[in-house]
Image (spheres, helix red, strand yellow):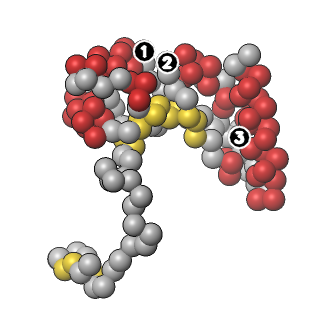
Amino acid sequence: MTHESEYYTFQDVYFEPKAHRPDGPRLCFGRAGMHDAMVRRIVRYGHAFNPLGKVQPEEVQTLKTAMAAAGRDIADLEMIGSTRAMFPDDDSSADLAKALEPIPEQMAQGFTTFCVKPSQFTDDPNGVGVFCREVTRRVESLTT
């Protein structure tokens, strides 16, 4: 592939391996507000939705209604929730327990996948595996 424009020019670019999905790549939409255009994009093209923050129940209902009107089931849309790291000062890691508090509410809204950024909670790159196991343990305890 070759492309030339005012801002970008490249030659002989290729991508391997080729996409394995006959219908193309999966598209995940985030948001800067649940505006009408975002809902239309999610309904028409979306495979996943990551709101990048707290979603109000009425916003989830708006999306659910729009999906149903288009013949789609919101259950087929991967709903990606998240944590919000709160740092006590400039030199400390965030409190994991506090960050995980919204998870049960998000699960009740239909979110099934959660984005947690280890670097917000540990400064030890060798401790990421232990950290991930701890996240799993804590989330399981929140949901039982």
The residue shown at (35%, 23%) is 73
**Relative depth, front residue between 10 and 15:** 15
How far apart are labels 1 and 3 at the CA level?
Answer: 27 Å
Disc 1 marks a residue whose amino acid type is: Pro
Rendering coords of residue 27 (x, y %): 36, 46
Comparing marks 2 and 3, which lies closer to the viewer? 2
Q: Would residue 95 appear left or right of 103 to someone viewing this image?
A: right
Q: Would residue 43 appear left or right of 21 to someone viewing this image?
A: left
The residue shown at (78%, 32%) is 137
Rendering coords of residue 42 (x, y %): 30, 35
Q: Which residue is mark 1?
A: 57
Q: Which residue is mark 3?
A: 94
Disc 3 marks a residue whose amino acid type is: Ala
Disc 2 marks a residue whose amino acid type is: Gln
Q: Which residue is mark 2?
A: 109
**Relative depth, front residue between 108 and 89:** 108
Going from N to C along the chain, the mark reached first, 1 or 3, is: 1
Specify whether residue 66 is in view: no
Q: Choose top left, top right, bottom left or bottom right for residue 136.
A: top right
The residue shown at (58%, 40%) is 115
Going from N to C along the chain, the mark reached first, 2 or 3, is: 3
Quadrant containing the N terminus in the rendered view: bottom left
Query: In the current view of this chain or complex, which residue is farthest to the bottom?
Result: 11
Quadrant containing the C terminus in the rendered view: top right
Going from N to C along the chain, the mark reached first, 2 or 1, is: 1
**Relative depth, front residue between 121 and 51:** 51
SS type, badge 3: loop
| CA neighbours of label 3 inside 10 A, class few (<14), some (14 to 19), many (20+) | some
The mark found on residue 84 in the picture is none
Does the CB distance between marks 2 and 1 fall below 8 Å?
Answer: yes
How far apart are labels 2 and 1 at the CA level?
Answer: 7 Å
